[in-house]
Every structure is written in C-alpha cells, then in structure tokens.
Image (cartoon, rainbow, N blue to C red):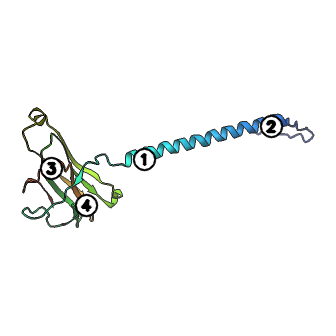
Amino acid sequence: MGEVFVMDSQATVTPVPAMQRIQGTYVLYVLLGLALFGVLVEGLFIYRLYQKTSTPQASALGVIQWSDFGFPAFSRGFSYSNGSLIIHTEGFYFLFSKVSFTCSTFQHEVKLNSERYSYEPIRLMVDNRRSLVNQMKPHEKIQFSSYLGGVWLLHKKDEVFVAVDTRCLAEEQGENFFGGFMI
C-alpha cells in the first residue's frame, strides 16, 4: 500500500548543453509570443463584435413627438417628456399606438427605456409593413395604418416611446396617437 521513494544523494546531475538550453528558451519565447498574439487578435474580434451589436439597427427610425391636444393620450400614472411616457407607479399597463403612413415599406415600434436595462431601448412591440399597392400605382398616394397594443409590467421611472420612419408618417390631425392606462 505505501510507497517508498529513495533519493540517491551521490547521483550526478547531467547538465544541459548551453546550445540546447538557448534553443529551448527561443522556442519558449516564440510560443509565448504566439499565445499573446492570439489573445490580442481574440480581443480585437470581441471588440468589433461588440461594436456591431451596440449600434442601433434601425437608425432611420425617429422618436415621435406627441401633442396631448385633442386626444387624451396621457392618462393618470404617466407624465410626458421628450416623446416618452414616463411611468409613475409600478404595475401592469395596456399600451397602445396607432400611426398612419404613406410609404410602401414602414416600421412602427413601441420601445422601453429602463434603468433595469442600462437605458438601452428595447422593443416591446413592432409592426413591419411592406405593401405592393404603392409599387403598382406609384402616382396614387395611398395611406396605411398600423396599430400596436399590449399589456406590459412597467416599473417606476420607465420610459415608453414610439419610433417610426418619420419620412413616411402621415401628419393629419387625429391619425396618429399613443397612450396607455393601468390595468
């Protein structure tokens, strides 16, 4: 069961020749350099990947600035600032948004800005539209609508806003609205 090791103190150490020791050191330095170069290249790839994922995908989308005149879009429990509804009380809210547009391709999004997500806007609801009607009759101006609605758990100080392609937005009175209420 037990093992016994005996060390011979009279044994001579065979020295490694100097040339072989120098070659081994060079090999070690080359391998160490390759490893460091690999770490550098990997860091560069991770940095570039992070840069690609952190840029907004829909840069053409703009936040709509709303007016509370004529439609009670901003209910109790909200305040309005810079295109966003700001939540005052945590709870479940029904959020809704309707926009009208004149382009054949259109994107309508309701997004959330929250401290819980480091103030990076996240999509709550999205509607992507593509119509062939405008392409078949380009001289006619046709108007389309998009309606989004859903129930969401929102926390105090969360900000909810609508982003659309503002070039295509129909700006007629009452055609576009945004709001919500606590359930």
Under tag 2, what secondary structure?
A: helix
Q: How far apart are the alpha carbons under marks 1 and 2? A: 44 Å
The tag earlier along the polypeptide, 3 or 1, is: 1
Q: Residue at x 59, y 41 (%)?
A: 37
Tell me if 44 is positioned left or right of 115 in this view. Answer: right
Amino acid type of disc 2?
Arg
Q: Position of residue 80 (x, y in %)?
A: 20, 65
Amino acid on which the number 4 mark rests in the picture: Glu
Q: In this orientation, does residue 182 appear?
A: no
User: Picture quarter containing residue 29?
Assistant: top right
> Label 2, on which residue?
21
Gap in angstroms between the C-alphas marked 4 and 3: 22 Å
Q: Residue furthest right?
A: 10
Q: Give the amino acid at mark 3.
A: Leu
Q: Which residue is mark 4?
A: 159
Sequence order check, earlier mark of 4 and 3: 4
Quarter location, residue 28: top right
Please tell me which of labels 3 and 2 falls first in the chain: 2
Q: Upstream in the sequence, badge 1 or badge 2?
A: 2
Query: At label 1, which amino acid type do we have?
Result: Tyr
Q: Which residue is mark 1?
A: 50
Rounded to the nearest angstrom, the CA distance separating label 4 from label 1 is 25 Å
Residue at point 15%, 39% (across, down): 104
104 displayed left or right of 31: left
Taking 91 as reference, is 126 above or below it?
A: above
The nearer-to-camera label among 3 and 1 is 3
> What whole-number distance in Å separates the C-alpha atoms at marks 2 and 4?
66 Å
- Percent x, y for residue 51? 41, 47
Q: Residues within 10 Å of mark 3 (few under 14, many from 20)?
A: many
The image quarter in which residue 177 lies: bottom left
Question: What crowding class fits label 4: few (fewer than 14 Cα within 10 Å), some (14-19), or many (20 or more)?
Answer: many
Residue located beneath label 3 in the image? 169
